[in-house]
Image (cartoon, grey):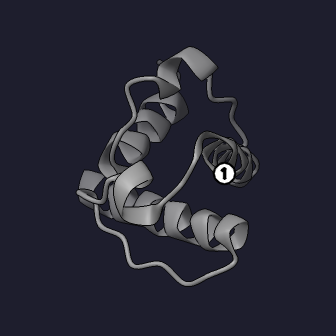
Amino acid sequence: MQTVVTDLTVRQIALATEQVLGKSVQISRETDIARDLEVDSLSLMNIVMELEDAFDLSVPLDRLASVQTVGDLADLLAMLRRGH
């Protein structure tokens, strides 16, 4: 069941990224956010804001420092949704 949640989270990350970047993206858990998607820090913050709205949660900025891939971001969102 965890895989389904993660897949939906990755899909939501893709939707938020497309909205912020204004272009279609193909992502997987291994996609490097900065290198593969060419997302700078400002765009990342906008993507995170979209995700905060979508999941009705707040992402602490210090937790973003360890996020490099889409999978890292999906895992962080899953952890925050569980209240950790």
Residue 17 drawn at (x, y percent): 59, 65
| Nearer to the camera, 13 or 36 | 36
Is 37 positioned to the left or the right of 18 in the image?
left
Query: Mark 1 — residue?
Result: 43
Q: Is residue 50 above or below residue 84?
A: below
Residue 1 visible in this rendered orientation of the protein: no
Is 8 positioned to the left or the right of 47 in the image?
left
Residue at 51% from the left image edge and 69% from the top image edge: 14
Image quarter in which the N terminus is found: bottom left
Residue 73 drawn at (x, y percent): 42, 42
Residue 84 drawn at (x, y percent): 47, 18
Residue at 35% from the left image edge and 40% from the top image edge: 68
Residue at 31% from the left image edge and 49% from the top image edge: 71
Is 68 positioned to the left or the right of 15 in the image?
left
Residue 74 visible in this rendered orientation of the protein: yes
- Residue type at mark 1 is Ser
Secondary structure found at label 1: helix
| Nearer to the camera, 34 or 61 | 34
Q: Is residue 8 above or below residue 78?
A: below
| Nearer to the camera, 36 or 30 | 36
Q: Residue furthest bottom?
A: 24
Count residues near mark 1 (Cα–Cα under 10 Å), then give few for <14, some for 14-19, many for 20+. Answer: some
Label total for image: 1
Determine the image quadrant of residue 28.
bottom left
Determine the image quadrant of residue 42.
top right
Residue 25 drawn at (x, y percent): 47, 78
Q: Is residue 59 above or below residue 6?
A: above
